Image (cartoon, rainbow, N blue to C red):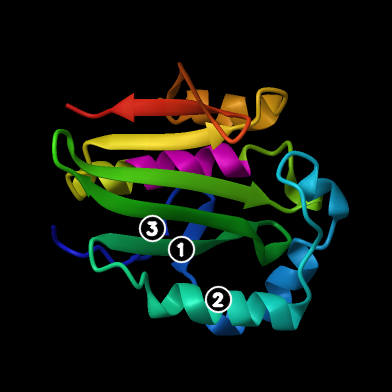
Amino acid sequence: MTTLRPETIRTDRLTLLPLKVEHAAEMAAVLSDPRLHTFTGGAPDTAQALRDRYERWVAGSPDPAASWCNWVIQLHDAAGSALTGTLQATITEDADRGPTAEIAWVVGTPWQGRGIATEAAQGLVTWLRQHRVHTVVAHIHPDHKASASVATAAGLTPTDQWHDGEIRWQLTIS
């Protein structure tokens, strides 16, 4: 499998920027609302904890068969440009189906309800198609209606498979 690296992705209102360690301080503020952990558990990370995590993510997967692609979501609007969330894809090779991407997103509370996660996820799926990824997967808590809406808009559908209390959503790209 060819190792994928995140590239800048542009949509109508967003630029998905490959994650850098330097994004940690701003992202700590973006992701500081404890409500963002309602369905995933845990608590907001400090800027230093995010910096440590981002260092690991930017270094890449220790598994040579997996590509870690991480982005920050930058919104461009009348107020200017601001980081609003993150997007990630872990790409692995499935012997039967080809490259599979497991994706996830989070948008800071002040920017929710504006279609940012939907636009970012759609942009990511388009990018994955261009890189010949065959299957896109997301795991979503059954009560997380907003994430279910994002997944639906990005072309994923729920399956009957569960993983750690979440429903597996999937898109098979022909």
Q: Nearer the viewer, residue 108 or 15?
A: 108
The residue lying at 76 percent from left, 69 percent from top is 45
Quadrant position of residue 83: bottom right
Secondary element at image label 1: strand
Separation of residues labelled 3 and 1 (CA atoms):
11 Å
Tell me which amino acid carries mark 2.
Tyr
State the mark number for residue 54.
2
**Is residue 117 shown in magenta?**
yes
**Residue appearing at x 53%, y 35% in the figure:** 139
Q: Which residue is mark 3?
A: 9
Residue type indicated by callout 1? Asn
Q: CA distance from mark 2 to mark 3?
A: 19 Å
* Label 2 vs label 3, nearer the camera: 2
Please tell me which residue lies in front, 116 or 96. Answer: 96
> Where in the figure is residue 26, as x and y percent of width and height?
71, 75
Query: Which quadrant: the N terminus?
Result: bottom left
Q: Is tag 1's residue or tag 2's residue first in the polypeptide sequence?
A: 2
Q: Which mark is residue 70?
A: 1
Query: Magenta part of the protein: which range?
Result: 116-125
